[in-house]
Image (cartoon, coloured by chain):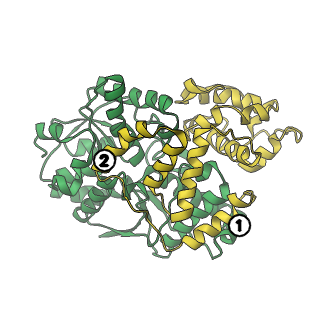
Chain colours: A green, B yellow
Amino acid sequence: MSKYAYFPGCSLHSTAREYEFSTKNLSRELGVELVDVPDWNCCGASSAHATDRGLDLALNGRNLDLAAGMGLDLAVPCASCYRRLASSRKSLTENPELRQQITTLLGQPLALSSEVRSLLEVFTTDEALDKMQRGAKKSLSGLKVAAYYGCLLVRPHKETHFDDSENPVSLDKLVTLMGGEALPWPFKTECCGGSLSFTAEDSSRVLIERILNMAKESGAECIITACPLCQSNLDMRQLQLAKEAGRDYNMPVLYFTQLMGLVLGLGEKALGLYRHFIDPRPVLQKVGLV
Amino acid sequence: MLQTVVSEETGVAELVRLSGVNPNQCYQCGKCAGGCPLSFAMDYSPTVIMRMLQVGMLEQVLSSKTVWLCASCKTCSNRCPQDVDVAGLMDALRIMAWRKGSVDRDNRQAAFHRAFLHSIKSHGRLYELGLALAGSAASGRMTKDLDVGLPMLRKGKIKLLPPRIKGRRQIKRIFALTMESGGEQGE
């Protein structure tokens, strides 16, 4: 059994609760123990790093210190939190002077967690995949999936040791392993606009539609992602696109944890499938997954 | 790598100190603009921003739409053959704009960041409902936001009560020592 400190982040406690449920329920099946970092705070993304460098590093430093106290590697499901934590850890490790400044801001000694890993990495280790294959009760056979990585899971390449920044394959491999069809498509790492969907709706909509269009043209029946903001932008905004522009994509956007859970026989409730705006159940029903 | 001198007079030297990024390393290949998902909406592409900084046009850069339309996707930084962290520079430009007080009142990205950080300062974590209500009230877009807000409430995606962490005192201390005191720490 592998054990990690777990940093859910704000989205997983609100807009992405189905990511949290499916993660926790899946972790038990995969034999991965996730222990919540006690009293964690928001990582500040995407506002702190755009406002004050000390604020950004201190908010993330506090979380890294709490995780270090647990003596475990840190597993992070949200791509934005993952990037902020991993990037801050790198800056603070490489620059002792900076670390001293952040220690002053925190008013306490600052220990740094041993390693920051994305949840995707944690759930796709050889050990976890082996466990999944042996416990598989269903297959994704017949399901055409566009694996969407977004930005911060794999970029910038200098800061990440996981997958490829221009053509990542970890989600694709996972889909193939589960018997599904991972479609070749060119928008794996296109940006969904992130928080611009709240402040620059017109520009953000262009990005979201580009991704949805490409997924559709590529023949996808659903998109899978490992980022709560990508998921909510691509899923929720389809409501507005249908209402305001009359464009009905009807493209379900799932978390990779939900598909893994389905393969392992977890139920709709345990995976929060009913929480999506574009109901994924008809597509999943067609291939016998629900 | 070739080291280039940045003029002290234009304020670009201050930007270089703040970001650790030197725009003079850019040789204008255009890869950042080519890959930027938002360049279509920007007034100056990232490549043009780099050139403007090279010739000292900091004021114009600070008041550009580009700085606030950057989504921090890091495609530019990832692809730059000169290893210039363009996205890091955009962060530093936003930080600098705050400090110089050159952020417009009607800048919606800036207003969002302010409301977001206020929420973190109060609760230690993001309180979405509080942020959404503050945002809608400020922008007068209440009905438009309700289109997504109500379905989110129905799906149980918005908590009614704010989260509250125990370490709020420490979070407030961090805010007091950083952005509320002019943000001189952590440079």
- Badge 2 amino acid: Tyr
Asked if A76 appears above or below A50 in the picture, the reply is below
Residue labelled with disc 1: A101
Of residue A101 and residue A13, the one placed in the foreground of this image is A13
The local secondary structure at tag 2 comes to strand
| Pointer 2 with pointer 1, Cβ within 8 A | no
* Chain identity of mark 1: A
Amino acid at the residue labelled 1: Gln
Q: Visible in this render: residue A200?
A: yes
Q: Residue at x 53, y 73 (%)?
A: B167
The quadrant of the rendering that contains the N terminus of chain B is top right
Mark 1, other Cα within 10 Å: few <14 / some 14–19 / many ≥20? some
Q: Which residue is mark 2?
A: A255
- Label count reads 2
Left or right relative to A82: residue A18? left
Q: Is residue A21 left or right of residue A282?
A: right
Q: Chain of mark 2?
A: A
Q: CA distance from mark 2 to mark 1?
A: 38 Å
Reading the chain from its start, which is encountered first: label 2 or label 1? 1
Q: Position of residue A118 (x, y in %)?
A: 42, 55
State which quadrant residue B71 falls in.
top right
Residue A141 visible in image: no
Q: Residue B178 or B148: which is nearer the viewer?
A: B148
Quarter containing the C terminus of chain B = bottom right
Task: Identify the residue at image location x=25%, y=50%.
Answer: A258
In this rendering, is residue A51 above or below B147?
Answer: below
Disc 2 crowd, CA 10 A, few/some/many (<14, 14-19, 20+) = many
Residue B2 sits above or below residue A35 on the image: above
Taking A101 as reference, is A241 left or right? left
* Residue B161 location (% of width, % of height): 40, 62
The front one of A220 and A31 is A220
